[in-house]
Amino acid sequence: MLHHEIEGRPDAPPVVLSGSLGTTLRMWDPQMEALTSRFRVVRLDHPGHGGSPEGGDGSIADLGRGVLDALDRLGLSRVSFAGLSLGGMIGMWLAAHAPERIDRLALLCTSAKLGTPASWAERASAVREAGTASLAETVAARWFTPGHTGAEPYVRMLGEVSAAGYAACCEAIGAMDLRPDLRLITAPTLVLAGAEDPATPPAHAELIAAGVPGSRLVVVDGAAHLASAERPKTVTWHLLDHFLAE
């Protein structure tokens, strides 16, 4: 089972948070105070990330099934779901293939199709050879805008991720094409992009918003890929606004 933490009101509606490739569930710390005052919040680590064991077949579908298994074990039949980057990819798969399980959906700084299988295979190979710490400088430049001073805790998270777990998730992203699934998503959906995100630029969010019926697009100024960390108050406000909507 995926490593998880549950906080907030036990009787409140459940919200699941799933983060970026190369981070742990701690990446959501800036949102927790506000979310736990209104929801029962479940944070999950991807396989090989944080406290979750390595495993799986290296596909987005397998990662999605891992989340469904965790929800089943926790007795959660229907949840709202927020995913950033890889977490958003998993959220799209869940909302398209298990729509009865997703109440409201928030997709942050993510993509329905990202890069090529070859480019992701190359990154996976490099990480298996040199470890996740070898990515620190490159990843920090993608996660945050130039001059941002709060990157260090998130770069440390990257070092906590196993090389095999990171590489397997790279291969899942490389093989992924969720564009045909977008029209199947029926959950009310917020699509949020960082205006200065070099990893999943706003055009990726625009494609998702155009494909998901009735979705709403928000672009956050002054944010790169980890918008939830770089602009925490703005992102938290949009999550609350979306999840509390009638």
Image (tube, rainbow, N blue to C red):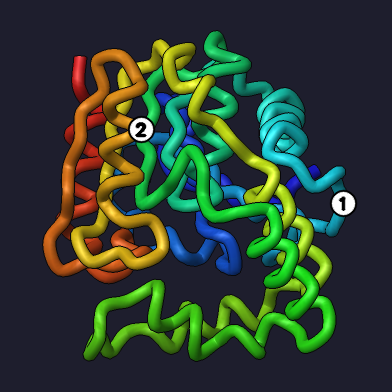
Q: Residue at x 86, y 43 (%)?
A: 57
Q: Residue at x 39, y 28 (%)?
A: 105
Residue type highlighted by circle 2: Ile
* Residue 26 percent across, percent down from the top left: 51, 65
Q: Which residue is mark 1?
A: 55
Crowd tier of the residue under label 2, counting other residues whose Cα lies within 10 Å: few below 14, some 14–19, many 20 or above? many
Q: Which residue is mark 2?
A: 208
For the residues labelled 2 and 1, the Cα–Cα distance comes to 28 Å
Q: Residue at x 16, y 55 (%)?
A: 220
Asked if residue 4 lies left or right of residue 73, the reply is: left
The quadrant holding residue 192 is top left
Quadrant of the frame with the C terminus: top left
**Of the pair 105 and 44, the residue shown nearer to us:** 105
**Of the pair 180 and 6, the residue shown nearer to us:** 180
* Residue 45 percent across, percent down from the top left: 64, 55
Quadrant of the frame with the N terminus: top right
* Residue 236 percent across, percent down from the top left: 24, 50
Q: Secondary structure at mark 1?
A: loop
Residue type highlighted by circle 1: Gly
Identify the mark at residue 147; answer none if there is no mark.
none
**Of the pair 72 and 187, the residue shown nearer to us:** 187
Q: Residue at x 24, y 15 (%)?
A: 214
Crowd tier of the residue under label 1, counting other residues whose Cα lies within 10 Å: few below 14, some 14–19, many 20 or above? some
Residue 4 visible in the snapshot: no
Q: Secondary structure at mark 2?
A: helix
* Residue 22 percent across, percent down from the top left: 60, 68
